[in-house]
Image: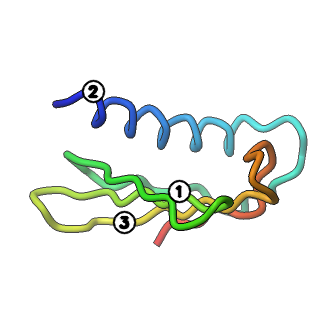
Amino acid sequence: MTDGDISTRFQAQEILNRVFNSSENTLSVNTGFKVPKYDQIIASYPNDTTETYEYKYGGETQATMTVVYTDSTKENFYSVTMT
């Protein structure tokens, strides 16, 4: 495991922590995210307000979490989805 792997896992976990522990009531969570078994998370940043975290196990994609923020400061969520 490299430092990049650890950093990406930390970022993805921090997003989940913020979603479920938010006291600002800025995000409505109707159902919990089921994080699949994974041995790798690949992060990508397609634009200034979007982050994606691809959960893989044995090289196969298990799920993708997409985080969209209201603006480039990334202080407030617009949406968080897991597919």
Q: Which residue is mark 1?
A: 33
Q: Residues within 10 Å of mark 1 (few under 14, many from 20)?
A: some
* Residue 16 drawn at (x, y percent): 57, 43
Choose mark 1 or mark 3, whichever is in front.
Answer: 3
Q: In this view of the protein, which residue sits in the foreground, 1 or 47?
A: 47
* Residue marked by disc 3: 63
Look at label 2 and name its amino acid. Answer: Asp
| Nearest to the observer: residue 43 or residue 48 | 48
Distance between the Cα atoms at labels 1 and 2? 26 Å
Q: Amino acid at mark 3?
A: Ala
Q: CA distance from mark 1 to mark 3?
A: 10 Å
Q: Looking at the picture, how far across and down is residue 70, in whole percent?
A: 81, 59
Residue 40 horizontal side relative to residue 15, left or right: left
Which mark is nearer the camera, 3 or 2?
2
The answer to whether mark 1 and mark 2 are in CB contact below 8 A is no
Is 80 situated above or below 43? Answer: below
Mark 1 or mark 3: whose residue is earlier in sequence:
1
- Name the image quarter holding residue 2: top left
User: Disc 1 vs disc 2: which is toward the camera?
Assistant: 2
Q: Tell me which amino acid carries mark 1.
A: Phe
**Is 23 placed left or right of 61 in the picture?**
right
Looking at the image, tell me whether mark 3 or mark 2 is earlier in sequence order.
Answer: 2
Q: Where is residue 45 drawn, in percent x and y?
A: 50, 59
In this rendering, the answer to whether 63 lies above or below 13 is: below
Q: Name the residue tied to disc 2.
A: 3
Sequence-first tag of 1 and 2: 2
SS at mark 1?
Answer: loop
Query: Where's the N terminus, which quadrant?
Result: top left
Q: Give the residue at x 32% y 57%.
A: 55
